Amino acid sequence: MQNQYDFKKYAILYVDGEEMALKYFGKSYANEFRFYTATNAADGLKILEEHGDEIAIFISDQRMPGEKGVKLLERARIMCPRMIRILITGYADFSVTSDAVNLGSIFRYLSKPIQVEDVRTTLHRAMEFFILQQERDHLLQEKLSTLQNLLITDRIMSLAVVSAGMSQSLNNALPALASFLNLTPGRLQQQHLDLTKLSNPAFWRDVHGQVVEQSGNIAELIGSLTLSQKDEEEFAAEPALQNAIESNQSQFVEQNVALKFDITGPLPSLHSSAEGFNQMMSLLLKAESALTPAGDSVSVIAKANNEGLQLTFTATGSALTPELLSTVFDPFMRSTDSSKTGVLPLMGAFFLAYHLGGRITTQQGADRQVIELNLPAQNSSHTSGPESGREFITKVLMNDMLWERLLPNG
C-alpha cells in the first residue's frame, strides 16, 4: 500500500498479555511501523509517560492480567488526548465495545484472531489520521502565534498613542516605556493552549474579555498619572518617605509580606513634584506588596548619593517572572490576581520616576529581586522639552530591540 507519509516518524504502543501476540504483531508490520510493546498495563503506562510525545497509536488487548484494556485506554486518553486508540479482544462482548467507545474514545474495535491485511489497513488509516491532526494543529499554532503577535502589537500601539498624549503632564515618556518593556527577558514563549478550545466561541469571548479588561486597566493607570500643574517645590525626602511607608503598610499586612524600612545617613531635600513623588512611592510599594509571595519580605533602604536620593527595594522570592510581565501585553497569558495588581503599578512607577528626572533599574536573582530608584535632588527633566506624539510613536515602532523582546519567533 502506497502512502505519502513517513509512518515511522511516530510510534505505535501495543499492550498485550500474550508475548507471542506481541512478537507476531511486530514481525507482521515491522517494515512499515516502529513499535513499543508491553505485557501489562503498568508497563504500558510507563512507556506512555516516557515516550508520549512520539506515540501516535495506542493498541491494547482487553483481557490482560491486572487492568483491562478499556480502562487502560481511558487512562491513555486522559494522558494523551490526541493519540489514536484501538482495542483488540477475542471475545464478542457488546458491553466491552460500548465501554470502549464511551470511555476510551477508541478509533476502532478489532476482534481476534486478527486479520493481517485488515489490521494493516487500520494502522495506515489511524496513522494518517494522527498525522493530519498534527498538521492541522501546527497550522492552528501558526495562526495563534500570528494572532498573539497582532494582539501584542495592537497593545503596544495603543499604549504608545495614549502615552503620546501624556507629554503635557509627564516628561520622558519614551525612555520610561522603553525601560519598562526591556524588563521582559528575551522573547515571549508561545503559549501551549489546548487547541480544541480554538473552535469554542467561549474561548474567544474569554480572550476578548481579557483584552478589554487589561486595556481598561492600562487606560485607568495612565489616566491616574496625570499630575496637576503645580509649581515644583522643595521638600524633605525623609518625612515624605516615612509618610509613604506608613500609608501603604496595611497592604503588606493583608498580603502577609513583611516590610522593613531603613535610612542610611541624612537624606537630601528634593526640588521636584511632591505629589508625583508620593504617587510614585505608592505605586512602587503596591507593586512590591502584590508581587512578593506571602510569607516573604521586602526591605526598603534609603540613602543619599551624588545625584540626590537612592532607594533600593529588595524582595525575597523570584517575583518578577517573564510570565508576570507578559500579562500586561499578552491576553493569552493566564495571570493571578497579584500579577494584575502588581505589574501595572510598576509600569506606572516607571513613568513617574522618569518624569521626576530619575530612573529605575532592576536585578533579578534566583531567590530575590532588586529594584533601584535614583532621583536627582533637582529635577531638570523638563529642560529637554516634551516629544511630539509622532516622534514618540515612531521611536517605539522602530525600536527593533523592543520588538525582538516582545514578539515570539521573530
Image (spheres, helix red, strand yellow):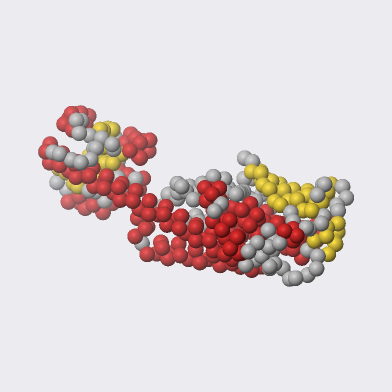
Location of the N terminus (image quadrant): top left
Residue 195 or residue 373, whichever sits in front:
373
Residue 50, given in percent of the width and then of the height, sits at: 38, 35
Q: Is residue 394 left or right of residue 246?
A: left
Residue 283, given in percent of the width and then of the height, sits at: 69, 59
Q: How many marks?
A: 0
Residue 218, given in percent of the width and then of the height, sits at: 58, 64
Q: Is residue 77 visible?
A: no
> Measuring 85% from the left and 52% from the top, which residue is drawn there?
267
Q: Is residue 138 left or right of residue 98?
A: right
List the single residue furthest toward the right: 266
Q: Is residue 106 visible?
A: yes
Residue 175, given in percent of the width and then of the height, sits at: 65, 54
> Measuring 30% from the left and 51% from the top, which residue is drawn there?
136
Residue 272 falls in image quadrant:
bottom right
> Measuring 82% from the left and 47% from the top, which residue is drawn there?
305
Residue 266 or residue 158, whichever sits in front:
158
Residue 395 or residue 189, whichever sits in front:
395
Residue 238 falls in image quadrant:
bottom right
> Measuring 48% from the left and 66% from the top, which residue is drawn there?
209
Q: Is residue 176 above or below residue 213?
A: above
Residue 219 falls in image quadrant:
bottom right
Residue 379 or residue 375, whichever sits in front:
379
Q: Is residue 389 left or right of residue 59?
A: right
